[in-house]
Amino acid sequence: MTEGADDPTGGDLVAASTKLPVPAAVQDAIRTLIEWAGDDPTREGLIDTPARVARAWKEYCSGYGEDPALHLARVFEEVGGYDEIVLLKDIPFQSHCEHHMAPIIGKAHIAYLPRDHVVGISKLARVLHAFARRLQVQERLTAEVADCIWDNLKPHGVAVVIEASHACMTARGVRTPGVNMVTSRMMGVFRDDERSRKEVLALMGC
């Protein structure tokens, strides 16, 4: 069956979200938040905002309905004897901080050293996005991506480095823009062998 054949949105999350029914209780909660912030939820510009916000958050958190491991289920063994590092770098992503529900915007570098098979390169980005589209902390996001690849591909090593800006720090609280947080997780040879670790970090530009 062609993907999206029975889906009028063609699998488009944005198109699907505009048709998603929003429970009254959810809209009431958002109206309460608008009023508590100091505005009038009944004024013209805000009338439809509760439904829009609710659908947006359903999209932001779409990762809860996704199993990241499924993206790594199909592998390829015909790789011409290739046994060096596979790296996908500068993958942009967006998430939301679980403490303030503020945006986390950054990029990730994901690498692994295959044992006897590889996975389609886009699947590494899909694993990242599946975990990022949940309420997160960057440290856990880094660990979840690395652990998922390690557990499902069984490679010689996995390296994940994430660099991101957190609106909970740049737009509120200490209000310090231009600051990025860097987290990493090294597994297998990238953790145990210093030369391998230096090689993958150099390829990442870290």
Image (tube, rainbow, N blue to C red):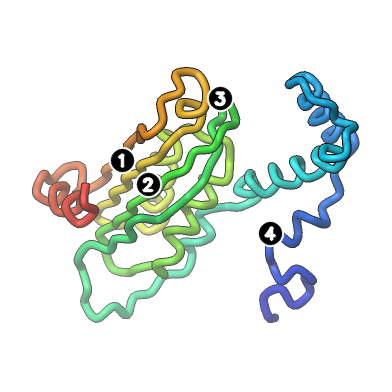
Residue under circle 3?
99
What is the CA distance from the residue labelled 2 to the residue labelled 4? 26 Å
Q: Is residue 72 left or right of residue 80?
A: right
Of label 4 and label 3, which has the lower sequence position? 4
Name the amino acid type tagged 1. Arg
What is the CA distance from the residue labelled 4 to the residue labelled 3? 25 Å
Residue under circle 2?
146
Name the amino acid type tagged 4. Leu
Where disc 1 sits, the SS reads strand
Q: Mark 1 touching mark 2, by CB under 8 A?
A: yes
Residue 166: mark in rendering: none
Q: Position of residue 91 (x, y in %)?
A: 40, 56
What is the CA distance from the residue labelled 1 to the residue labelled 2? 7 Å
Residue under circle 1?
185
At x 56%, y 24%, the residue is 99
Classed neighbour count for the residue bearing mark 1: other residues with Cα under 10 Å, few (<14), some (14–19), many (≥20): some
Q: Is residue 186 left or right of residue 98?
A: left
Of label 2 and label 4, which has the lower sequence position? 4
Name the amino acid type tagged 2. Ala
Q: Quadrant of residue 2?
A: bottom right
Of label 3 and label 1, which has the lower sequence position? 3
Q: How many marks?
A: 4
At x 67%, y 75%, the residue is 3
Name the amino acid type tagged 3. His
Residue 13: mark in rendering: 4
Q: Quadrant of residue 114?
A: bottom left
At x 68%, y 65%, the residue is 12
